[in-house]
Image: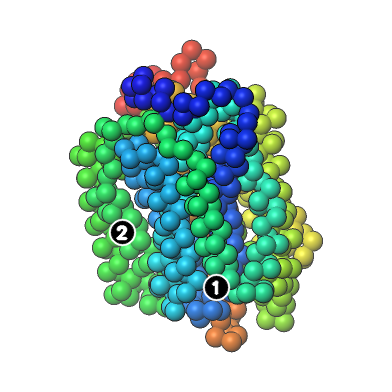
Amino acid sequence: MTTEQEAGGRGNGDGDERWSPRWVGRLLVLVLVSEIIPVSMSLAATALPAIGAEYRTTQGSWTLTASYLAAAVSMPLIGKLADIAGKKKLLLVVLALTVVGSVLSALAPSFPVFVVGRVLQGASFALAFLCYSLIRDLFPPRLVTFAVSVTVTGTGLVLIGQPFLAGWLIDGYGVAGVFWFLAVLVAVLLALAVVVVPESGVRAPESRPDFVGAGLLGFGVAAVLLGVSIAPGAGLLGAPVLLLVLIGLVLLACWLVQSRRAAQPLIDLRLLGSRSLLPIVVAGGLVYGAGASTTLVLPMLAMTPRELGGSYGFGLTATQYAIFGLVSGAGLVVGGLLVGLTARHGAQLHLVMAAVVMMVGAVGSALFKGDYALLVLATAAAGLGLGIGGAAIPNLVIESVPPERQVISSSIVEVSRTLIASIVTPVVFVVLNSNIAQLAGGQPVYAAGGFDAAYLVVGLTIAVGGAVALLIPRPAAESTRIRPLTETA
């Protein structure tokens, strides 16, 4: 980056170093834009039972998997394109894609079309780092820290209020109502961003997006997951399953070869040869990615009528389910605050603590799935662990990685989190679909043991992540240099 570019980006030449209506307006729009991610994912997760009923499918996990997978492969591309063309331009493109995807999901006549809409909405995951980058480039230095903090902590307020919004939309307007709401909300924010947010002058024209790598990775993982997801119906060794898995593995092998030859690969696997970064990528991805899957199981468990579930289920409407979303959101906020207040103890301890608390939540959810009050407490524990983990992961990168590599390292960790979430989600559904007790109105009612097995998968994945977190080396006081695995101590 040249000095002229940096000067042109910082503050956008306004010369105003104090808070003014201009800065407040820009910050408000960027905060609201960054909230699209938790709102859209939480609404979709709460609507899972309604989506399954609407399209009469047992593959509802693709509602979340499609977005997670699209996010994992699109975020690095969007980041590179933003460096070349401008962050505001890409912010507007992502918002437009989210609007189109929301409209497509609202109008979808079939589940495959609905999933295509969710793929387009997956681009919205890039909004967070685009907003942070715009704040860093545009705002005066003395306003940046507060502006970024407000952008991050605003998520908690949305997570607390969102469950009641989800209940109102789903119970009153159905699946289409959820996605029409998202389409209108994002369209309004798109218009505001066009008017209020200026373009950054910071460019990195040497950036090169890796479209080939994104295609190989995305389609490779998608093929494997599609094969796994149809296994309960087609048979584990059925021809469609084996063919899809084989195609996926071939594409992934090609991606590994291509990523080592590309000058600027989608994911720089060479950085994973680091003693400090590799365990962060693995542990952070497993703990946070698997922990996010708890939101997949809970709505189906709580909304099943007790007369059908037998030992579980409360027959809740989406509005009545809001209490679970409320305690989960509160847990997220408290977890983030807890990390901030105890930062001196180190982020490694926080990530291990997150794994332990989330496992308590998963085990508690399995054991007390028939007890409303105890299930609420288990949900709060899972949310608390997720909040601790979410705050610990970026701190781990800051502690362990040199400043000049923190941006690219953070992007690798973020891809790991969304990619693992996209993998765990259909695996959980495979477990559930292998434990269907009966059909009611064409929809599956899962055996109680299916939920136990699903929480076991989530808990074991988190446990592995917590164990890997113990291997993260504590940063040496004299250096945080990345050392390759092949380098002797």
- Viewer-nearest residue: 25 or 271: 25
Q: Which colour scheme is used?
A: rainbow
Labels 1 and 2: the sequence-earlier one: 1
Using the image, determine if residue 462 lies above or below residue 63: above
Seen from this angle, which residue lies furthest right?
Answer: 373
Q: Residue at x 45, y 75 (%)?
A: 108
Image quadrant in which you'd find residue 121: bottom left
- Viewer-nearest residue: 170 or 9: 9
Where does the image place residue 132, in percent across and percent down from the top left? 51, 37
Q: In which quarter of the image is the N terminus?
A: top left
Q: Which amino acid does label 2 sit on?
A: Phe
Query: Going by the image, does 150 lie left or right of 274?
Result: right
Q: Residue 176 carries which label?
A: 1
Seen from this angle, which residue lies furthest left?
Answer: 261
Using the image, determine if residue 81 lies above or below residue 217: above
- Measure the C-alpha gap from mark 1 to mark 2: 28 Å
Q: Is mark 1 on a helix, strand or loop?
A: helix
Q: Which mark is residue 219?
A: 2
Query: Going by the image, does 289 lie left or right of 295?
Result: left
For the residues carrying marks 1 and 2, which lies nearer the camera in this image? 1
Residue 96 in view, yes or no: yes
Q: Which amino acid does label 1 sit on?
A: Ala
Q: Is mark 2 on a helix, strand or loop?
A: helix
Where does the image place residue 291, in percent across and percent down from the top left? 57, 51
Q: Quadrant of the C terminus?
A: top left
Residue 301 in view, yes or no: no
